[in-house]
Image: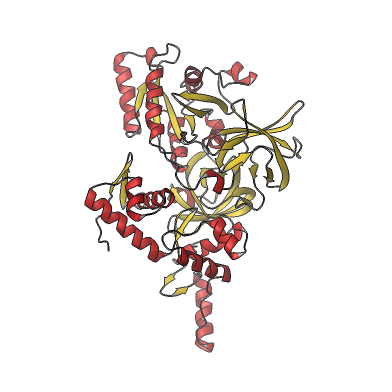
């Protein structure tokens, strides 16, 4: 079985040698613009194939100047692992730190630190710079490199091979997931028409397939596909892709647009509810911020929902779906505050201090109200008696019944939507309603359990790990009698809740994993 495609991205301060290192690794100069060559600095994203033994990765080279952080975020949004480049004569610098914060907000955890320009410093400075990098990124392997001399380049390749071996996307096969490509370049090729490029975030695209260009909703056909200048019949998730599109002109698709399929989960939105995984306090302290999602960005007003969550009221539409990662930056002075994941890509308007997580009460699903409506409701109840709490929608009830019937193997969103006779976006919204009410537990965007099923499986996993000391995905899969998709979703969720702790391919008891189970 062929290894899954991966995309690696550079990160680091300007003039620390990212592009020179890419040239040493790939043989290609990713500074393709005359302005870039004249100024000796990257301005746009650069791309190249990276051969690592029998694997071919896509590589994205990002600009390091603080004025081009927006471009860096657009490129980093599609990467699976990083090469953090730090020059030995400078050590970690401001954009080193900001790029790391962007990677953390995007959930990109795997990577290698390349300490470059080691030929320009003495042994003491070399050791000091290496120590500074290790203190900054203790979990990432560090390789000392001189790109012009070729020193350390093969060692860097070996380190990347080791890191890529630990990355496993799991989940459903590409054929079962809708394709989503955030466009980072759009141009015209004489005799061929409109060409767009981007990293295929999910799913698979085939030659001849009908697609939709969002946000306008124009339909197009994939005439041809290239992956690093090689024509292919289909492209898989995590590959750098160039699509020749028929049916749209060069002025009808641009950077920031999304290529997907009709009726998919991605849609334009002017409001997003997000769980803030990094910098929550800093984000909600701002009135207005810049929100980056995919290759698009928009200013937004911030509404604090409490419990490390916020609603972003966007001043221009973003193209979002449940579970997407976003990066949040301060508008003035500019700087990366943090980020999170999309909890609801099209929520109702919420007031400040009002949580989007409804109260959880036995046997009921109640929408949490702000203080003023509660006071008004209390006055009404004094006169007329209590009113019945708002219940789940009919679609949510249907989906809950399907989840209950699915037991340990609940159907995915597409199947749920089909069984309920709803479109996927309606199903996503109804599932969000169930999750917010505590009537369902979302392990990842495609895997949702009833609380009873989740607790049963969780307890079995924790007992297994406790008894054996650790467990792999395969061991959990076999113990539970589930597919790899469900086993991986369970383990990743328990890792995130710190009930387990992942180290390489093994999962160990975490900080909260010693609590009573069963």
Marker count (numbered) = 0
Provide residue 220's location: percent of width, then percent of height: 72, 42
Residue 168 picture location, percent across and down: 42, 40
Instruction: In the rendered view, tell whether residue 351 sits above or below residue 335.
Output: below
At a point 25% along the width and 61% down the height, the residue shown is 516
Check the picture and name the quadrant holding the C terminus.
bottom left
375 left or right of 501? right
Nearest the viewer among 169 and 339 is: 169
Examine the image and state in which quarter residue 459 appears: bottom left
Give the percent coordinates (x, y) of residue 37. Answer: 60, 17
Query: What's the residue at 64%, 43% (across, down)?
Result: 258
Residue at 67% of width from left, 42% of height from top? Answer: 209
Residue 465 shown left or right of residue 324 in the figure: left
| Image coordinates for residue 56, horizontal then vertical, percent | 49, 27
371 or 256: nearer the eye? 256
Can I make out residue 296 in this image? no
Look at the picture and state if 211 lies above or below 446.
Answer: above
Examine the rendering and report whether any part of residue 308 can be seen.
yes
Q: Is residue 505 above or below residue 134?
A: below
Is 473 left, or right, of 381 in this rendering? Answer: left
Q: Residue most toward the top?
A: 149
Coloration mode: secondary structure
Q: Residue at x 31, y 50 (%)?
A: 500
Q: Which of the 4 image quadrants contains residue 135?
A: top left
Which of the pair 201/403 is nearer the observer? 403
């Amino acid at each position: 079985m062929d290894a899954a495609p991966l995309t690696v991205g550079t990160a680091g301060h300007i003039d620390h040698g990212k592009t020179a290192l890419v040239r040493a690794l790939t043989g290609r100069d990713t500074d393709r613009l005359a302005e870039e060559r004249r100024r000796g600095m990257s301005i746009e994203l650069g791309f190249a194939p990276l051969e690592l033994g029998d694997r071919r990765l896509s590589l994205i080279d990002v600009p390091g100047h603080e004025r081009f952080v927006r471009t860096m975020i657009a490129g980093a949004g599609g990467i699976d692992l990083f090469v953090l480049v730090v020059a030995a004569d400078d050590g970690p610098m401001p954009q080193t730190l900001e790029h790391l914060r962007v990677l953390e907000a995007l959930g990109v955890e795997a990577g290698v630190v390349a300490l470059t320009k080691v030929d320009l410093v003495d042994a003491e400075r070399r050791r000091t710079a290496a120590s500074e990098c290790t203190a900054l990124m203790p979990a990432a392997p560090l390789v000392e490199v001189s790109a012009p001399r070729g020193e350390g380049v093969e060692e860097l390749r070996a380190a990347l091979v080791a890191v890529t071996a630990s990355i496993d996307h799991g989940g459903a096969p590409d054929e079962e997931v809708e394709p989503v490509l955030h466009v980072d370049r759009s141009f015209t090729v004489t005799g061929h028409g409109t060409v767009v490029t981007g990293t295929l975030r999910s799913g698979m695209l085939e030659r001849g397939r009908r697609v939709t260009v969002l946000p306008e909703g124009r339909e197009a056909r994939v005439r041809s596909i290239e992956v690093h200048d090689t024509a292919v019949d289909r492209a898989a998730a995590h590959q750098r892709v160039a699509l020749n599109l028929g049916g749209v002109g060069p002025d009808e698709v641009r950077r920031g647009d999304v290529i997907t399929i009709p009726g998919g989960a991605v849609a334009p939105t002017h409001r997003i509810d997000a769980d803030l995984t990094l910098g929550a306090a800093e984000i909600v302290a701002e009135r207005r911020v810049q929100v980056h999602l995919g290759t698009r960005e928009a200013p937004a007003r911030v509404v604090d929902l409490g419990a490390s969550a916020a609603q972003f009221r966007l001043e221009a539409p973003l193209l979002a779906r449940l579970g997407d990662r976003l990066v949040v930056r301060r508008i003035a002075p500019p700087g990366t505050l943090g980020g999170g994941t999309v909890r609801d890509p099209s929520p109702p308007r919420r007031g400040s201090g009002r949580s989007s997580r409804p109260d959880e009460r036995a046997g009921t699903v109640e929408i949490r109200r702000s203080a003023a409506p509660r006071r008004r409701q209390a006055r009404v109840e004094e006169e007329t008696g209590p009113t019945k709490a708002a219940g789940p929608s009919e679609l949510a009830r249907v989906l809950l019944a399907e989840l209950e019937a699915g037991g340990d193997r609940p159907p995915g969103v597409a199947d749920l939507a089909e069984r309920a006779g709803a479109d996927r976006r309606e199903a996503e919204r109804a599932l969000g309603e169930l999750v917010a009410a505590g009537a369902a537990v979302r392990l990842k965007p495609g895997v949702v359990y009833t609380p009873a099923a989740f607790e049963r499986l969780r307890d079995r996993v924790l007992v297994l790990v406790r008894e054996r000391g650790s467990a792999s995905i395969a061991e959990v899969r076999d113990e539970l009698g589930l597919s790899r998709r469900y086993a991986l979703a369970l383990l990743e969720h328990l890792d995130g809740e710190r009930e387990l702790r992942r180290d390489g391919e093994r999962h160990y008891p975490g900080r909260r994993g010693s609590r009573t189970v069963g």
